[in-house]
Image: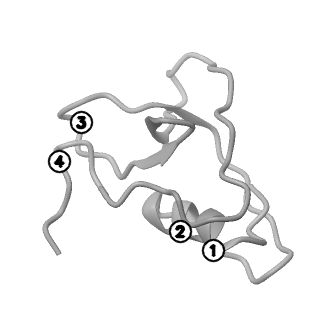
Amino acid sequence: MHTGTPAHRHIARQLGLPVPRDGGFVSARIVPALPGVGKPVAEMDGRLWSLASPEDPVHRAPALPSHSHSAASSDHVDGPRRR
């Protein structure tokens, strides 16, 4: 994921990934999030995603937000955190 936008940095934080400086990249395999698993999640392309485990099947990657901060505010599959 290219972290040149605030939305991309937000997604990296939500998933617990390192957040590189502007112009940097981070790469991770993700899968559609499963309810009740308790893994960190981020919304991309209208769906919740979490980091993949080695046994998870391969899925087509979602479209990333382009410029705006459009990532979901929920942090875990068990439900959104109250802030």
Mark 3 surroundings: few (<14), some (14-19) or many (≥20) residues within 10 A = few
Report helix, strand or loop for mark 3. Answer: loop
Residue 1, located in which quarter of the rendered image?
bottom right
Choose the circle earlier in sequence order: 3 or 4. 3
Q: Which residue is denoted by mark 2 in the rendering?
A: 10
Spatial CA distance of label 2 from label 3 is 21 Å
Spatial CA distance of label 4 from label 1 is 23 Å
Choose the circle earlier in sequence order: 2 or 3. 2
Percent across and percent down for residue 34 are: 31, 28
Spatial CA distance of label 3 from label 1 is 27 Å
Asked whether the residues under the numbered discs 2 and 4 touch, taking CB atoms below 8 Å apart as contact, a structural biologist would say: no
Spatial CA distance of label 1 from label 2 is 6 Å
- Mark 4 or 1, closer to the camera: 1
Q: Which residue is denoted by mark 4 in the rendering?
A: 79
Q: Which residue is denoted by mark 1 in the rendering?
A: 6
Report helix, strand or loop for mark 4. Answer: loop
